Image: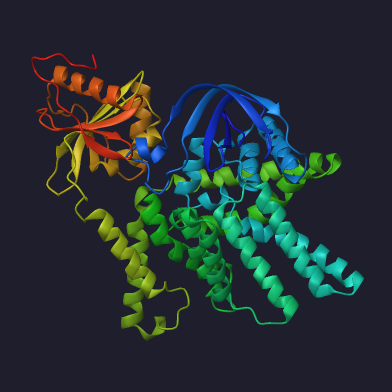
Amino acid sequence: MPGPRCLVDASVGADSYVRLSVEVMDCAVASGDVLAIGVQHIEAPPASRDPMTPRTRRGPPVVWASRAWLHRRGQDGYWRWVANRRARVWRHAWSPAARLVAASVLGLRSVASPELKQSFRWAGLGHLLAVSGLHVALVVSLLSGVGLRLGGFVGAPGLGRAAGIVLPSLLYVGLTGAAAPAVRAAIMLGLWSLSAVWGRPAHGLTILAVAGVAMIGWEPSWMFDPGFALSFAAMGAVVTAPPRAGLLQVSWRICWWTAPVSWWAFDTASAVGVAANLVAIPVFGVLVLPGGLLAHLGPGPIASRLGPVAEAAAALLIDWAQLISSAPAALRGVETLLALGIAGWIARWFSPRWSGWRHLPPRAIVVTLVAFVAARRWAPPPEPFADFYSLIGARSQATVLRLPGRRRGFASGCLVGAKRAPAYWVTVLPRLGVRRLLRVDAPSSYAAELEQRWNHAGFPSVSAGGDCPAFDAARFQQLRRRCRWRAGGDVWLRGSYDGSRAACFVGGRWQPLALPSRHGRDPSA
């Protein structure tokens, strides 16, 4: 995966693999290449060193390298062409619009800035940045006509149509990195085309179920992938839609069917996403996707003419996403979506006029979303929160100091010494039970950006001059040194203000930390 640092999944031996993160390297490498690397350090998988990383995203160990060289070149073929093409796109994607085209059309999400990803996510358009069934279906719809004409020319229109569906979907899935939603779409399109060739009726839910079983059997870890769940929820909404459902009704159903998964996995479910998709999907399907594909894969004269068209449409999508994401947090929150669903069903019960309205959300989906929100918002945490949490790095030490609130599991807090991206803390602080910030001890520009993002996420403003808890600074520093000495790298520490309890997150779990003696020598010093 090309990007600011080249990411390569490399096998080490027969049964294990690692992820290389290389600072200086030509990222056009393909299967079969043998690399020589200069190793800087090796990190454990993300979920084993960061408690804020979902445990389903375990991933392989990460090897950080300063440089890598191609020791022996593998065979040329389709994957070599894919690697060269993706590396070329990364080198030429400079403007935000060009980066959006590369991210949404070719699956190069690393070229999109964090701000762009956040605005699309808040606007309910995050699915455009990840290659999904929508992308595969649009590509196949553009090319299936060619296969049908070729099949008619040789006297086998059904076989030609099937080839025009299966081959483009497989090639596009390989080009974009074979994400779980794209694989699901390719399997479903292949089964649907085979049913047409054999003259058998196709049943949408059956094909969806067969695709799901086949994918989980091939790669069981996809069962825990949020993109996999979102893709199946969206496709379930499509295949169960009424026969004459229009774009508005299908978008409305997808919004509701994906809301429980989106809320559970990403803490977001937006009612404004329906309006955003009504504009974004036609622009993306008509201009960005076909224009971007031909601009990056077509011959020079076509690429030079369609590239600016795709980038202009991408710039329009960026402005649209920023406009929608700037809406008040109350409109983007899950509470608005729940209020609409509950109000619709109340109106249906008390007014016969609404009984046949087709845009009412499914009752089971509304109940599921209510249960998910209640479980996330009001259920007690699986284990009591600690008094403080500290992220200890080589050059920075960020600490979250908690003040318990009236509601169990929710608290005010202070953030001291933060240097990571503000978007990271907007995600992490609620997971630590902090819903109100009293103070941010950081440079003024950093604190202002964090407060802006904090408010935009729907949390109250940072209080000016809030009182933070007092603690034994010397003993706290001893705990930090001992925890980092035990982990051998960046690590999370948690404990109590009086120093009686402390634990380090090592090896994927919180391990109790032996407390330093108040008079003895600290072995990690």
Could you say which quadrant of the image residue 392 lies in?
top left
Question: Is residue 88 placed above or below 143 in the rendered structure?
Answer: above
Q: In the drawing, does residue 23 fall left or right of residue 54? A: right
The percent position of residue 295, horizontal first and vertical second, equals 76, 43
Tell me the residue at 72%/82% (across/down): 199
Q: Nearer the viewer, residue 243 or 314?
A: 243
Can residue 249 be seen? no
**Residue 404 vertical position relative to residue 92 in the rendered view, above or below:** below
Q: Nearer the viewer, residue 19 or 116?
A: 19
Question: Which part of the image, by quadrant, shows the N terminus?
Answer: top right
Which residue sits furthest bottom? 352
Residue 479, image x and y in percent?
20, 23
Query: Is residue 490 shown left or right of residue 519?
Result: right
Q: Quadrant of the C terminus?
A: top left
Residue 68 visible (yes or no): yes
The quarter holding residue 152 reads bottom right
> Relative to 287, is 256 on the left or the right?
left
How is the structure coloured here?
A: rainbow
Residue 355 spot, x, y in % from top left: 40, 83
Q: Residue at x 70, y 73 (%)?
A: 194
For the point 23% across and 39% down, which residue is it?
Answer: 436
User: So how many labels did they put on this image?
Assistant: 0
Locate residue 322, reporting x and y percent. 50, 43
The answer to which image quadrant residue 279 occupies is bottom right
Q: Is residue 418 above or below residue 410?
A: above
Question: Which residue occupies 56% across, 49% down?
Answer: 130
On screen, residue 392 versus residue 410, left or right, reads: right
